[in-house]
Image (spheres, rainbow, N blue to C red):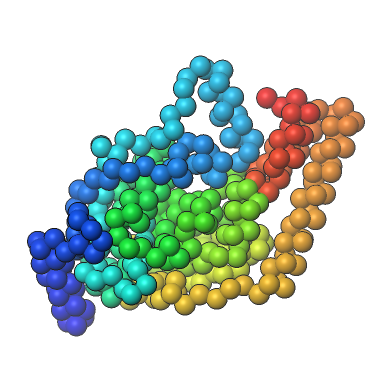
Amino acid sequence: MILQRLQLLTTLVMSSLAAAAGTQPQGEGAPTGLLSDVVFTEYSPLSGAAEVTLRLMSPLNALRVRRALQHSGNAVRDQSIDLTREKFAVYVPTQAPPGGYSLLVFVPPWREATVPRQWLATLERHGVIYVSAANSGNDADVLDRREPLALLAEANLSHRYPVNPARIYVGGFSGGSRVALRLALGFPDLFSGVFLDAGSDPIGSAAIPLPPADLFRRFQEATRLVYVSGGHDDFHLQQDKESQQSLEGWCVLDLVTEDAAWTAHEAVDARAFNRVLDAFEHRKAPQSNQLQKCREHVATELSSQLQRAEELVAGGKSADAVAAVRKIDARYGGLAAPRSIELAEKAGAE
């Protein structure tokens, strides 16, 4: 305990000195240390409405949104966030590792933009930049705020600092952890790992639809999921089991569970957080044979359900066909498109 406190105190002193001196690892305006009320200025195509809708909504729901906007006559805003009004908390280690910084984008359940103090020494030791947005808690809109804020944080820090693109992670605590899972699933070309701290869900549902097939293949092949819940947090431990079973059924096999014994529903301590970062740094690819067999099983099930919906359309059973397509859309999301959209239109779905 004394050693941990000394490490934390040393980190805080180094951070303060670095910030005061304006240490700049990549050009001007890139200080290190603990930074508060940071304002970003750059937008990313990935945080735009079209990309967020494509990746984070099911095809039928995305189509409904587009049609509703067209009928209303309202213009679609490309970016839902006004960065001039947003503040972020950032921690940047004093020295960039030889291969570049890692980056952890953290989605909180609370409104404040904070960096957990117990994580500072661990972030410093692993060379991980941390960022979290203000007003991105559980009371904020997921699609219009929490997810775009996380994407914009990544874009700005990757531009300001030498960040290794292969070591960009997303994480969260409680409700924020569930948002992090959605982001990792929809943006596997951006995030190579997700830190799920006391909050997780099954995927392949109306709440967490699957992205387009090419993105989902990358998620299966290149994303590591690290689960941590307190040893006394029975509810979220059970959620983790259900989430992992769902992911394995969808051929997502790189799952890691870390222990946080003697804790309840609270952000993990320094030791558990250190194991999370270790897990990201020591990854292994899933066995190709196991992954291929699992994918073939999913593809066979999807083909069978689409064929059944096609038969209902051909038989003039429009109501039954619409119900079948909506069920397919909720479960298979982007994996079923564009055929699910075509069937919905044939069946006369609104």
* Residue nearest the viewer, comparing 332 with 197: 332
Say whether residue 173 is visible. no
Residue 92: where, in percent of width, then height? 25, 63
Say whether residue 29 is visible. yes
Residue 18: where, in percent of width, then height? 14, 66
* Residue nearest the viewer, comparing 197 with 263: 197
Which quadrant would residue 314 be assigned to in this image?
Answer: top right
Q: Residue lying farthest bottom?
A: 3
Horizontal arrangement in the rendering, residue 53 relative to residue 106 (left or right)? right
At x 50%, y 75%, the residue is 283
At x 80%, y 32%, the residue is 320
> Where the N terminus falls, by quadrant?
bottom left
Numbered marks: total? 0
Which quadrant would residue 116 be assigned to in this image?
Answer: bottom left
Which quadrant would residue 9 be assigned to in this image?
Answer: bottom left
At x 72%, y 73%, the residue is 289
Q: Residue lying farthest right?
A: 315
At x 69%, y 68%, the residue is 291
> Where the C terminus falls, by quadrant?
top right
Q: Residue lying farthest front?
A: 27
Residue 184: where, in percent of width, then height? 50, 56
